[in-house]
Every structure is written in structure tokens, then in C-alpha cells.
Image: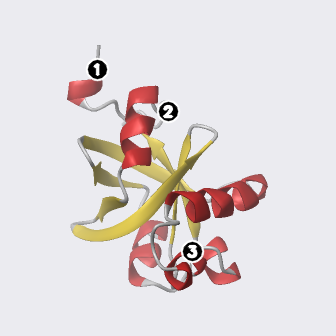
């Protein structure tokens, strides 16, 4: 498998930014979570921290699949550089501001910040390939 991370296209980022929920499939299990993009990168967080089942599953595997809007893609993940933390916080606050503040605030706690993943594209989806 080629593990080179591919860039997200502008069209993909638009779809992801317009879609509230992302389905992340890891080892046959699916979790529905929120996601944001910052600097053309995609990020997710576990509001329950690093001990949540899906986050532990992600740490034990190197790749999976996502589904969000019309985007279906094979992805990997890595723990993001600390420099993204504040920007990701602001992106969650902005994108999900139409939800109750208490729910949005759960995405920017120190527990959630410590359970962040940067989702990286491993293969361009067939429908997106030129």
C-alpha cells in the first residue's frame, strides 16, 4: 500500500465543510463524529478523550475509511501538530455554532484537544480521480 498522503481537493473540502457529520470506519466498526478543516487539513476529536473506544481503535490501526456527504475515501490518521490546536478549536466553534453551546464546548476541552486526529487522504476516491 502506498502510504503517501494526498492533498484534499478544494471540492472535497467544500463538501466536508458543508457536512456536519463524518462516518469513520475502522476495522469493521463505524463511529459518527464531527470534523473540521483547518489549512486544508481535516481534523476529528473524541469528546470522551483518548480512552474512548473509537479513539483506541484508531490508535491500534493505521487506516480506515470515511463517508461524509458524497465523499467516500480511504484514509489514515496521525496525531496533529500542536500548532493546529487553537485553529481547530475555533473551527469547531464556528462550524457547529448552530448547536447548543454546551455541546460545542465539549469539542474544545483539554480532554477533546488531547484526543485529536488529523485525517489524511490515502487514495483519491474513484469519482474524484481525473
Label 2 and label 3: CA atoms lie apart by 29 Å
The residue beneath circle 1 is 129
Question: Callout 1: few (<14), some (14-19), or many (20+) C-alpha neighbours within 10 Å?
Answer: few
Residue 125 versus residue 69: which sits nearer the camera? 69
Q: Quadrant of the C terminus?
A: top left
Residue 34 versus residue 126: which sits nearer the camera? 34
Mark 3 falls on what kind of element? Answer: loop
The residue beneath circle 3 is 107
Q: Earlier in the sequence, mark 2 or mark 3?
A: 2
Q: Residue at x 64, y 74 (%)?
A: 108
The residue beneath circle 2 is 4
Position of residue 58 measured from the top left corner of the image (x, y, whole percent): 43, 67
Please identify, in this view, whether the residue under mark 1 or under mark 3 is nearer the observer: 3
Q: Earlier in the sequence, mark 2 or mark 1?
A: 2
Q: Residue at x 34, y 61 (%)?
A: 21
Please identify, in this view, whether the residue under mark 2 or under mark 3 is nearer the observer: 3
Mark 2 falls on what kind of element? Answer: loop
Q: Are marks 2 and 1 in contact (CB under 8 Å)?
A: no
Amino acid at each position: 500500500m502506498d502510504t503517501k498522503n494526498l492533498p484534499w481537493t478544494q471540492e472535497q473540502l467544500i463538501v466536508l465543510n458543508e457536512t456536519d457529520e463524518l462516518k469513520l470506519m475502522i476495522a469493521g466498526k463505524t463511529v459518527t463524529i464531527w470534523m473540521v478543516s483547518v489549512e486544508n487539513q481535516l481534523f476529528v476529536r473524541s469528546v470522551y478523550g483518548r480512552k474512548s473506544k473509537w479513539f483506541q481503535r484508531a490508535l491500534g490501526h493505521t487506516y480506515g475509511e470515511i463517508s461524509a456527504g458524497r465523499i467516500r475515501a480511504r484514509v489514515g490518521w496521525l496525531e496533529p501538530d500542536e500548532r493546529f490546536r487553537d485553529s481547530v478549536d475555533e473551527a469547531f466553534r464556528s462550524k457547529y455554532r448552530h448547536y447548543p453551546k454546551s455541546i460545542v464546548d465539549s469539542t474544545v476541552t483539554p480532554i477533546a484537544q488531547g484526543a485529536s486526529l488529523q485525517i489524511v487522504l490515502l487514495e483519491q476516491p474513484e469519482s474524484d480521480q481525473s
